[in-house]
Structures are given as structure tokens and as C-alpha cells.
Image (tube, rainbow, N blue to C red):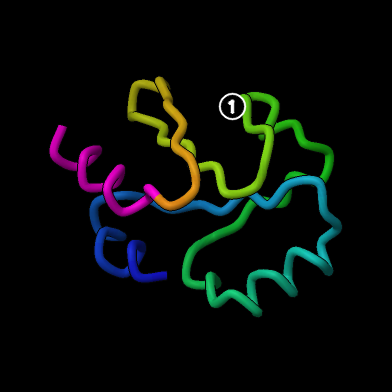
């Protein structure tokens, strides 16, 4: 993933595939080339619930102090740049 390659030294990326079994998660990671960062399987949706995620393609940015905000699909690079700048 280009954004992770560019900003991975400043931002920690963790994938949280939800509501899927591990074989499907592994297939997704391999098929989409996102194996360069860790993934946390959230088969029961607890992590998604904690951060009010309701669909795929949702990004959650968690600050060092535990506060967080969400972003939708297609805004990842811009949001990461803003996060780093602040």
C-alpha cells in the first residue's frame, strides 16, 4: 500500500478486517497486497463497535491520547498528511 510505504515511519497502520473468518481475511490480504502491516481479525465486530465502524473502507485515526476520528473511503492519503501536520 503506497500510503503505508510513504508514511509508515510516522504512522502505525493496522488493518482490522471485520465480520469475516480467518481464511477469508488471509485471502483478502494476499489478493490486495496489504501484508506489509499487521492485521487484527475482528470476526465478532467488537473492535468495529468500539470505534463506531459500520462498513468496510472506514479509516480510524487514533491519537496517542486515545482520541480518535473517522474518515471514509478515498481520503486516506490526505487524512494521513493532515494527521502528521497537526
Position of residue 18 measured from the top left corner of the image (x, y, whole percent): 73, 46
Above/below status of 70 relative to 42: above
Q: How many marks?
A: 1
Position of residue 40 measured from the top left corner of the image (x, y, whole percent): 65, 51
Specify the quadrant that holds the N terminus.
bottom left
- Local secondary structure at mark 1: loop
Position of residue 48 measured from the top left corner of the image (x, y, whole percent): 67, 34
Above/below status of 7 relative to 48: below
Q: Residue at x 21, y 47 (%)?
A: 81
Residue 85 is covered by the magenta coloring: yes
Q: Single out the residue that lies furthest toward the left.
A: 85
Above/below status of 34 relative to 43: below
Q: Residue at x 49, y 48 (%)?
A: 73
Specify the quadrant that holds the C terminus.
top left
Residue named by callout 1: 51
Q: Residues within 10 Å of mark 1 (few under 14, many from 20)?
A: some
Left or right: residue 36 versus residue 7 is right
Residue 49 is covered by the magenta coloring: no
Left or right: residue 52 versus residue 82 is right
Left or right: residue 44 versus residue 80 is right
Above/below status of 58 relative to 68: below
The segment highlighted magenta reads 75-86
Q: Single out the residue that lies furthest toward the front.
A: 74
Q: Residue at x 69, y 70 (%)?
A: 28
Instruction: Assign the magenta stretch its main secondary structure.
Output: helix
Frontmost residue, 74 versus 40: 74
Q: Residue at x 41, y 32 (%)?
A: 62
Left or right: residue 39 versus residue 78 is right
Amino acid at each position: 500500500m503506497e500510503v503505508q510505504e510513504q508514511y509508515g515511519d510516522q504512522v502505525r497502520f493496522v488493518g482490522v478486517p471485520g465480520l469475516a473468518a480467518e481464511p477469508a481475511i488471509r485471502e483478502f490480504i494476499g489478493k490486495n497486497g496489504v501484508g506489509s502491516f499487521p492485521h487484527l481479525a475482528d470476526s465478532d465486530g467488537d473492535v468495529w463497535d468500539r470505534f463506531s465502524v459500520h462498513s468496510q473502507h472506514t479509516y480510524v485515526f487514533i491519537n496517542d491520547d486515545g482520541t480518535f476520528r473517522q474518515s471514509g473511503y478515498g481520503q486516506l492519503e490526505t487524512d494521513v498528511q493532515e494527521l502528521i501536520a497537526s
